[in-house]
Image: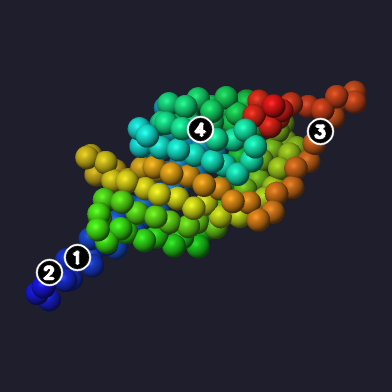
């Protein structure tokens, strides 16, 4: 490989790594701001997701969208994902695929009251689509720490999300 070809290959890898980081940030932004019309496009058609909590799994772009919309879409629910310390690896055999680890801190409020805080890691896989956009193909959230703050009104626990109440 010539020096120029090697340099171009390295630039392509750097650009792909940055695009993967942007894909993850896009997912968090879209989810936190409830931009539902953009959410499905964050995932590949055959994506699968596991948020590390019982009843919090979904397969396929449509099911992931429906799951997130029904569980995170309450008007009074506010989410904040803090993602950092990205480790991104582009597949040497298929430069249209990547794996990544992102450190996560998350905070969830309902009607202005904290209902959950936690931190952990997202272990992800991404694929570049024919349109050049990187999308999530596999999502795994592993909480190292998760604290829930149940809320009660007249002795009855306030429902947070359908999946957590199941």
Is the residue under label 2 in contact with that under label 4 (CB below 8 Å)?
Answer: no
Disc on res. 118: none
Q: Earlier in the sequence, mark 4 or mark 2?
A: 2
Tell me the distance, in whole angstroms, between the alpha carbons under discs 3 and 1: 53 Å
Q: Which residue is mark 4?
A: 58
Q: Which residue is mark 2?
A: 5
Task: Give the label, 1 or 4, closer to the camera.
Answer: 4
Is the residue under label 4 in contact with that under label 3 (CB below 8 Å)?
Answer: no
Q: Residues within 10 Å of mark 1 (few under 14, many from 20)?
A: few
Q: Position of residue 59 (x, y in %)?
A: 46, 32
| Residue found at x 71% / y 28% | 165
Q: On screen, 30 above or below 75?
A: below
Residue 128 located left or right of residue 99: left
The front one of 47 and 68 is: 47
Tell me the distance, in whole angstroms, between the alpha carbons under discs 2 and 1: 6 Å
| Residue found at x 39% / y 55% | 99
Is the residue under label 1 in contact with that under label 2 (CB below 8 Å)?
Answer: yes
Q: Earlier in the sequence, mark 3 or mark 2?
A: 2
Is the residue under label 2 in contact with that under label 3 (CB below 8 Å)?
Answer: no
Q: Position of residue 6 (x, y in %)?
A: 16, 71
| Residue found at x 41% / y 37% | 47
Q: Position of residue 60 (x, y in %)?
A: 42, 31
* Secondary structure of residue under mark 2: helix
Q: Which residue is mark 3?
A: 151
Q: Which residue is mark 1?
A: 9
Tell me the distance, in whole angstroms, between the alpha carbons under discs 4 and 2: 41 Å
* Secondary structure of residue under mark 1: helix
Q: Residues within 10 Å of mark 2 (few under 14, many from 20)?
A: few
Quarter the N terminus occupies: bottom left
Tell me the distance, in whole angstroms, between the alpha carbons under discs 3 and 2: 60 Å
């Amino acid at each position: 490989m010539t020096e120029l070809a090697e340099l171009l290959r390295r630039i392509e890898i750097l650009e792909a790594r940055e695009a993967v980081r942007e894909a993850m940030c896009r997912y968090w932004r879209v989810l936190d701001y409830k931009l539902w019309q953009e959410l499905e496009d964050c995932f590949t058609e055959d994506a699968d997701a596991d948020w590390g909590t019982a009843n919090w799994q979904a397969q396929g772009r449509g099911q992931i969208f429906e799951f997130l919309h029904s569980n995170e879409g309450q008007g009074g629910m506010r989410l904040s994902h803090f993602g950092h310390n990205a480790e991104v690896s582009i597949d040497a055999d298929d430069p249209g695929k990547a794996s990544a680890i992102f450190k996560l801190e998350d905070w969830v409020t309902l009607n202005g009251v904290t209902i959950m805080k936690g931190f952990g890691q997202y272990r992800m896989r991404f694929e570049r689509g024919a349109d050049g956009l990187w999308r999530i193909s596999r999502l795994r959230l592993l909480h190292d720490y998760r604290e829930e703050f149940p809320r009660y009104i007249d002795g009855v626990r306030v429902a947070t999300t359908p999946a957590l109440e199941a």
